Image (cartoon, rainbow, N blue to C red):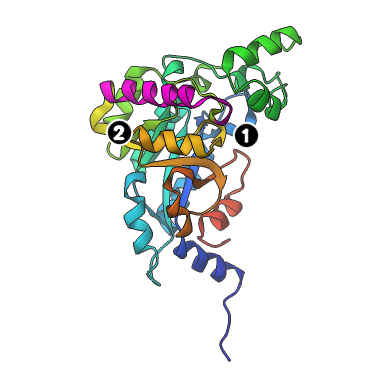
Amino acid sequence: MAVLPGPSGLLRWAARRAPLILAYHNVVPDDAPPAGDRSLHLPRAAFAAQLDILVERCTVVPLGDLPDAALEADRPTARPVVAVTFDDAYRGAVTDGVSELVRRGVPATIFVAPKYVDGGAFWWDELTPPGALAPAIPRSFALEGLQGDDQSIRAWASKHGVPVTPPPSHARVASESELSAAVRKPGITLGSHTWSHPYLPSLSYEEISRELTESWSWLRQRFSDRLVPWISYPYGGVSEDVEEVAAATGHRAGLCISGGRVSRRAWNTPHALPRYNVPAGLSARGFRVRVGGGAE
């Protein structure tokens, strides 16, 4: 009778069968006081420890190489295949986060919403009261009721007496010069996160097209040789119209913010690929299990 592998063995086997795209947001100084939406701001030491786990146990590939790497992952002796991404281009991610990546030779793609470049702040950080874990507005209402639109959400917050708490510098969006410095480092590329970070499924076809076209044009004018023609959808929002526009505007693939591993079937709809969002509170053990390296 064959002996079945234990839980850790099954996890490792499953990992080899399907790559994993990790979604991060920000990397902040270890001594930084809590600010903004807590789940998005990962302390630098915790991020560094996660990278060490990836280097030890996984094969980390550039995002653009993932389709080919997925075929290699089917080999029985292959290590788990992982790609690293960042949404929002926070200053902490573009500076401290990139430093940790480069130190270990780990490639990564940073998705940029150009409207916020040069120190912009996102509503979910400014509308999270001091001491709170998340914004003082229901997420579903902000996205579906207010289209994820920054101006509309702030107007609602003002009307309902929600205070604005400006985030620290590391929790604001990087400058164009900081992005330029980052992509001069080996393995660091950029991708589109739309122009203004709306909830795309709530927009018209024409509005979706404008968001994707303006963002890609801005990026191409400045970083043409360091771009990956993939898009990360704000809030993970995708629909048939969004997928169609993404393909029509030259994006080879589109990323959600949830859904787990990229199975073979997922490549049938490359403009709605799943990712694993890495929350700031995830333990080292939980991270090891999630990426397929076992619990110990």
User: What stretch of residues is rendered in magenta?
Assistant: 201-221
Residue at the far bottom in the pictured view: 1
CA gap between label 2 and label 1 equals 27 Å
Task: Say which residue appears at 56% left-offset and 32% top-offset.
Answer: 235
Residue at the far right in the pictured view: 160
Q: Quadrant of residue 160?
A: top right
Mark 2: secondary structure: strand
Secondary structure mostly taken by the magenta-highlighted segment of the chain: helix
Amino acid type at image mark 1: Ser
Q: Does the magenta stretch include residue 66?
A: no
Residue 285, relative to residue 78: is it above or below?
above
Q: In which quarter of the image is residue 96?
A: top left
- Left or right of residue 254: residue 38: right
Mark 1: secondary structure: helix
Residue 28, relative to residue 177: is it above or below?
below
- Binning the other alpha carbons within 10 Å of mark 1 as few (below 14), some (14 to 19) or many (20 upward) gives some
Q: Mark 2 points at which residue?
A: 227
Q: Which mark, residue 187?
A: none
Residue 98, relative to residue 274: is it above or below?
above
- Left or right of residue 103: residue 142: right
Amino acid type at image mark 2: Leu
Q: Which mark, residue 39?
A: 1
Most foreground residue, 2 or 258: 258
